[in-house]
Image (cartoon, rainbow, N blue to C red):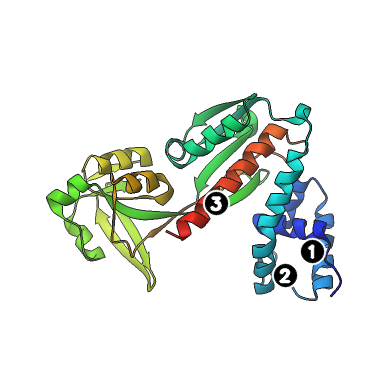
Amino acid sequence: MPELNLDDIAIFVRVVDHRWFESAARELGVPTSTVSRAIGRLESKARVRLLHRSTRALRPTSDGEELYAQAASAVTVLRGAARGLESATHKPKGRLRITAPGDLCANFLADVIAAFADRHPQLGLDFTLTNQQSNLVDEGFDLALRATSQLRGSSLICRKLGDIEHRLYASPKYLERRGAPATPAELADHPCVVFRAKELVRTWNLRDKHGETPLELRGRIGGDDFSFVRAIVLAGGGIGAMPHLNCVADEAAGRLVRILPAYHLRGATLYIVYPSAKNLPTRVTAFRDFVIDAFRTWTARSAAM
């Protein structure tokens, strides 16, 4: 087999990350035709189809998934090594404006932000915490972290970090008083803390290895912010379904206990978003890549738990 071009492999990784030629091309700052030709050369040399293409979707074939699994981390390492060769004048500095959900920054992302700030002492990090999807250009943000099932704004560059799994939790105080449900059906006999529930009614689509079980519940307490849901559950107010990445530290410290551990719920998808890939400042690329690497590491560690 002819030797595969490493630049073409790097482009292939970006295409799979974005699931679209145009988005990958915008990030790389090249025409879409350049990306398409690179994939064509790669498939021709490898003599296998790497991507399933349609007018509405793009996804890797089984051969493509295997190549991506082997190449993605290597591309990240090589990009990191290249950044390490930049001169001191190209080190991130100035102010970076970021918008992100408050509960994400107060939990999982707090350690990541602190580590990034320690690595780049010349850079100031200015966060606006909101669950609303701000207009990055009009409001002057460099980038955003968004947890959503659907992104608005096709002109934005969107990098998928991963899917957020929700799990069921209660506090030791609550379990001493009420005990834990042994089956999903028994949740109806417990006060539940629900997120964004109309008139406190919420359906939890519980998943296990056998499939999905929809369960409609009337919550005792509800709110539109996961920080609030977490606070109520910690206070013993009931059982709540919350993003796993927000509860890892609480679970490790014994402040929260996982309920019905065979089950989970599918949450939102986490993205890192920025307006354009053209002439992207070093401070933006540095933060973007740092968060991508941190989430990838966290996901691998979480999968082993």
Residue 150 visible within the image = no
Instruction: In the rendered view, tell whether residue 179 sits above or below residue 195.
Output: below
Give residue 297's mark.
Answer: 3
Give residue 169's mark.
Answer: none
Residue in the image at 26% along x and 64% along y: 184
Residue type marked 2: Leu
Residue in the image at 81% along x and 66% along y: 42
Instruction: Classify 10 Å Cα crowding around label 1: few (below 14), some (14-19), many (20 and above).
Output: many
In this orientation, which residue lies closer to the viewer: 50 or 109?
Answer: 109
Residue type marked 1: Ile
Would you name the residue on which mark 2 appears? 50
Report whether 162 appears left or right of 262: right
Q: Gap in Å between the C-alphas at discs 2 and 3? A: 25 Å
Would you name the residue on which mark 1 appears? 39
Instruction: Classify 10 Å Cα crowding around label 2: few (below 14), some (14-19), many (20 and above).
Output: many
Residue type marked 3: Thr
The quarter of the displayed image where residue 106 is located: top left
Instruction: In the rendered view, tell whether residue 289 sits above or below residue 257.
Output: above
Sequence-wise first label, 2 or 1: 1
**Local secondary structure at mark 1:** helix
Quarter the C terminus occupies: bottom left
